[in-house]
Image (tube, rainbow, N blue to C red):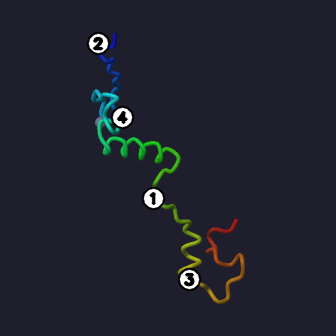
Amino acid sequence: MAKRKRVLSLRCPTCKKLVLCSEAEFPFCSERCRLIDLGKWASDGYVVSTPIFDPDELEHRHGEKPEGGADSGKPDHQRS
Ligand SMILES: [Zn+2]
């Protein structure tokens, strides 16, 4: 009965190329595309962006003012 094996195929989620289920990296066309797709998912929850430095904190680290208390690290013009 099995004259012809039904070939299951999907499109590679990364490059949309048709991939047969016999492929080693199915449903991806290649290991590269698999890794790219994995990376895509991973970066969804882990967004790599430029670190934001708090200017005040930078000043603290740089200055290390000896007479400074908890509050006096800020310049006068920032007080309200
Ligand atoms: Zn691909």
Number of the label disc, if any, that sits on residue 3: 2
Q: Nearer the viewer, residue 9 or 54?
A: 9
Q: Quadrant of the C terminus?
A: bottom right
Q: Nearer the viewer, residue 43 or 55?
A: 43
Q: Earlier in the sequence, mark 1 or mark 3?
A: 1
Q: Which residue is mark 4?
A: 26
Question: CB of residue at label 3: within 8 Å of ligand 1?
Answer: no
Q: Which residue is mark 3?
A: 63
Q: Quadrant of the N terminus?
A: top left
Circle 2: element type:
loop
Residue 26 percent across, percent down from the top left: 36, 34
Q: CA distance from mark 4 to mark 3?
A: 57 Å
Residue 23 percent across, percent down from the top left: 31, 34
Q: Residue furthest front?
A: 1
Circle 3: element type:
helix
Question: CB of residue at label 2: within 8 Å of ligand 1?
Answer: no
Q: CA distance from mark 1 to mark 2?
A: 59 Å
Q: Which residue is mark 1?
A: 50
Residue 65 percent across, percent down from the top left: 61, 86
Q: CA distance from mark 3 to mark 2?
A: 81 Å
Residue type, label 2 = Lys
Q: Earlier in the sequence, mark 1 or mark 4?
A: 4
